[in-house]
Amino acid sequence: MRIAIAYVLVGLVLSPIAVLAQDDLTSDQLRRMYEDALSQLKSAQDRRSELARENENLRAQITELEQKVRELQEQLDTIADVTLRVRSERAAWDAFLEAEPAIRRIWLGFLHENTLPRLDYRTVLDSNWPFYAIRP
């Protein structure tokens, strides 16, 4: 961008020198050259302002993405803390079961037995399901 502005400024500085070197230029040609130089300068300034707007938009997107990264990092830290706590509790439970063989046998028996009641799907699909136990 700076290079383009530099070229335009160099062109503006060298244009009068080139004009002076040519003796047969008319005022219309000089006016046209001046207007061309102005239009080039205006287009360079417009492009610069357009790039500045794009830069602002990109900075706003970067700010949003950095905020999302911070939020996700907080979630990750929370998950890591919970995972560590659960693993620690499991290790303590395993150590307790190793120290207490009687409780270990009871615990393993509980795990291998299917002591949880099975849910009958027909009961769940019953239209009176939550109230079927209330019937006289």
Image (cartoon, rainbow, N blue to C red):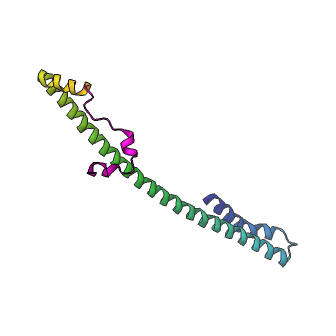
In magenta stretch: residue 115:
yes
Residue shown at 31% from the left, 35% from the top: 118
* Quadrant for the N terminus in the image: bottom right
Q: Specify start and end residues of the magenta stretch as a single range.
A: 113-135
Nearer to me, 32 or 113: 113
As drawn, 33 above or below 6: below
In magenta stretch: residue 63:
no
Residue at the front extreme of this rendering: 136
User: Which percent across, then down, holds residue 77?
Assistant: 31, 44
As drawn, 88 above or below 134: above
Q: Left of 115 or right of it: where is 72?
A: right
Place residue 5 in its image quadrant: bottom right
As drawn, 30 above or below 56: below
Nearer to me, 123 or 66: 123
Place residue 105 in its image quadrant: top left
Disc tally is: 0
Residue shown at 53% from the left, 61% from the top: 57
Nearer to me, 36 or 99: 99
User: Which percent across, then down, holds residue 26?
Assistant: 86, 76
Q: Left of 6 or right of it: where is 26?
A: right
User: Which percent across, then down, holds residue 110?
Assistant: 21, 27
User: Which percent across, then down, holds residue 23?
Assistant: 85, 72
